[in-house]
Amino acid sequence: MFKKKFGKIFKKSLIFIPKLFYKKDFYQSEFVLWLLLFTFILNAINWVAPFIFIRPIDRDIILHYNVYFGVDNIGNGKLFFILPFVGLALFLLNFFLADFFYRYKERIATYILLIAAFLVQVALLVASLSVIIINY
């Protein structure tokens, strides 16, 4: 009787939320898995590289360099972590949108979103590495 009466409530509880994200079709596609893996690895490198190379110092560091104008943004080293955070936010947004579109059989939209997330991570990694090289 207890299960019959409260079964629907427990199925909607937080315990069963991971089942909402596990869809066999989405995670069985090798193309999707490889894109997710490489995007996650690039984002992880983008988070780890500043911890390794940017030391906490009292002076400001160069945050942006422009070929035409030279240094155009100087600030605290903690501001450097905006790049990995933006990359993570865009990765999560594209991941959830890709999952949504895959559920409704929109494969091309899914692939475009995942490739865009990967390319954003590549661009942010290049930007991060260039800032690290300029400072050291």
Image: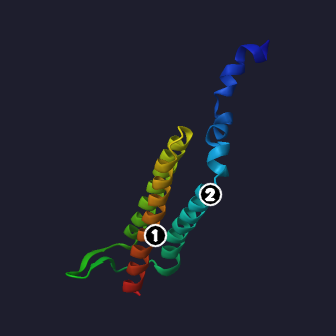
Residue at point 63% right, 53% down?
29
User: For residue 15, which numbered disc appears in the image?
Assistant: none
Amino acid bearing label 1: Val
Residue 30 sits above or below residue 130 on the image? above
Q: Earlier in the sequence, mark 2 or mark 1?
A: 2
Query: Residue 31 or 49: which is nearer the viewer?
Result: 31
Q: Splitting the image into 4 quarters, where does residue 124 fall? A: bottom left
Residue 45 in view in this figure: yes
Q: Splitting the image into 4 quarters, where does residue 44 fall? A: bottom right
Residue at point 77% right, 18% down?
3
Query: Residue 116 or 19: which is nearer the viewer?
Result: 116
Amino acid bearing label 2: Leu
- Cα distance in 3D space between marks 2 and 1: 17 Å
Evaluate if marks 2 and 1 touch, with contact meaning CB atoms under 8 Å apart.
no
- Residue at the far bottom in the pictured view: 136
Residue that carries the numbered disc 1 in the rendered image: 122
Residue that carries the numbered disc 2 in the rendered image: 33
Residue 91 sits above or below residue 59 on the image? above
In this rendering, position of residue 110 left or right of residue 67: right
Residue 13 location (% of width, % of height):
64, 29
Mark 2 vs mark 1: give the one in front: 2
In this rendering, position of residue 2 left or right of residue 79: right
Residue 57 in view in this figure: no
Residue at point 41% right, 87% down?
136
Q: Considering the numbered disc 2 on the image, is that residue within a helix, a strand or a loop?
A: helix
Residue at point 72% right, 20% down?
7
Query: Residue 55 or 81: which is nearer the viewer?
Result: 81
